[in-house]
Image (cartoon, rainbow, N blue to C red):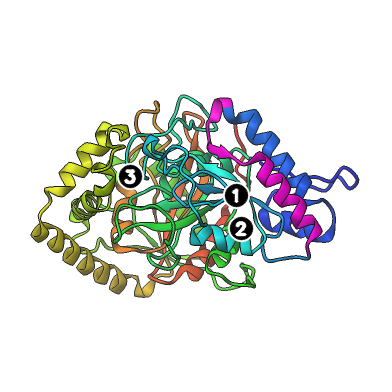
Amino acid sequence: MFTASSPSSGAVASTAIDCVRGIRSGQWTSEQVVRASLERAMAREEELHAWACLGVEEAMEEARQRDRQPTRGLLHGLPIGIKDLSDTQALPTAYGSPAYAGHRPFMDAACVALARAAGAVILGKTATVEFGATRPCATTNPHNKLHTPGGSSAGSAAAVADGQILLATGTQTGGSIIRPAAFCGAVGFKPTFGSLSPAGTKGYSWSLDTVGAFATCVADVALFFDVLRGRKESAPLSCAGLAPRIGFFPGPFANRADPAAAAVLDQVAARCSRAGATVRSFGCPVGFEQSLGWHRTISRYEMGRSLLPERCSAQAEELGPTLLSEIEGGRHVDDESYLLAKACGLDLALSVEALMADHDVLLTLATPGEAPYGLESTGDATFNLSWSLIGLPCISLPVAWGPLGLPLSIQLVGARHGDRQLLEAAHWIEQIASLHQLQEP
């Protein structure tokens, strides 16, 4: 886990909240914290490949500026990572594609501008799957380099889980936040669709793309979420409230999960129940079994139109063959199929909302199990696609080590625009299960 310490005090921060507090109090400077992050990132880059670009000089100069300035905001002096789908004026933005190598946007994406306004220091751009869609990047799992870190937000999840940074942005169209967070052992948060601005962030599905965040604990994710909404203050999460009402939902695809993942889900449910939470089985919403197909239809249709400019450009030969095939396939998805999938997705959303009236959160699987062997694939997103389809907020929490010595995580799902309630419940469960104290075997 990341530590930032002052030579004089020996103080240690393992969360973004504590790190920012330490900078404000003078325990350490932003320059010291940024230098520690850069040293860790550079030492691990040859094996982990978490970064598309590290802004060494830019970050150090920005940190020195923060040390000379009065406190600017909630993240003053803290180094963070930005997924390389979001534009940055000071650093190249390639969207994970050779077609955009060396591309320099003329302004920051909304999420970057908001983080800077809150005083954050941009350490660099984290590696991503090409356009967040296909062609896995070179990033490896921080716990075993022979296993995938997931995707598409591979670099963000790996860098946070490896202790290089405490916060990073991500995006999710299908499972691109929850899945890599689960595989790497970070906390990953996908907020309600549309709750954060996507301006300046490259996407390919206007009905599904969602900006989100990675951290080492739920409280840090909540802080970052407030920053990315432009808030000047952030109310701390509390465990003092009532225990949450939890809907237990292995779901209709549970047979795709490994026994270890299924067992961990049961164990977390039992532990929450013993701690006072109400845990009840959550009935399968009508149409849930067909949701994977609806998501596929929508994402392919919109990709075929969103990425058509790249397909028709002079740089088209630089695009990955799988991506080109997906774009072409998307162009052949007809309007009738697309509109039917959207209508069915809306009906499913209404069914889920009705069933959730008596629950604060749903407890379900994040992935089928530990990160798969190999880097040719980013893993199975089966347990993420349905929630992305209907736009509900989700959070992944690491809970155990699996048989292969890799993290196993759970997923919590909240009501639409019930992001704060989801974060509160996740924080309660995190404390009950001591998930944030996950230690490597």
**Residue 265, image x, y percentages:** 42, 49
Q: Which residue is mark 2?
A: 220
Residue in the image at 41% along x and 63% along y: 393
Task: Please name the predominant secondary structure of the magenta segment in the image.
Answer: helix
Q: Amino acid at mark 2?
A: Asp
Q: Residue furthest right?
A: 8
Measure how far apart labels 1 and 3 are at the Cα level: 22 Å
Q: Amino acid at mark 3?
A: Ala
Q: Amino acid at mark 1?
A: Thr
Asked if marks 1 and 2 touch (Cβ < 8 Å), the reply is yes
What are the residue bounds of the magenta stretch? 46-69
Q: Which residue is mark 3?
A: 381
Q: Is any atom of residue 270 visible in this view?
A: no
Residue in the image at 50% along x and 26% along y: 145
Q: Which residue is mark 1?
A: 216
The C terminus appears in which quarter of the rendering? top right
**Residue 369, image x, y percentages:** 39, 38
- Choose the circle earlier in sequence order: 2 or 3: 2
Measure how far apart labels 2 and 3 are at the Cα level: 25 Å
Height in image: 200 above or below 326? below
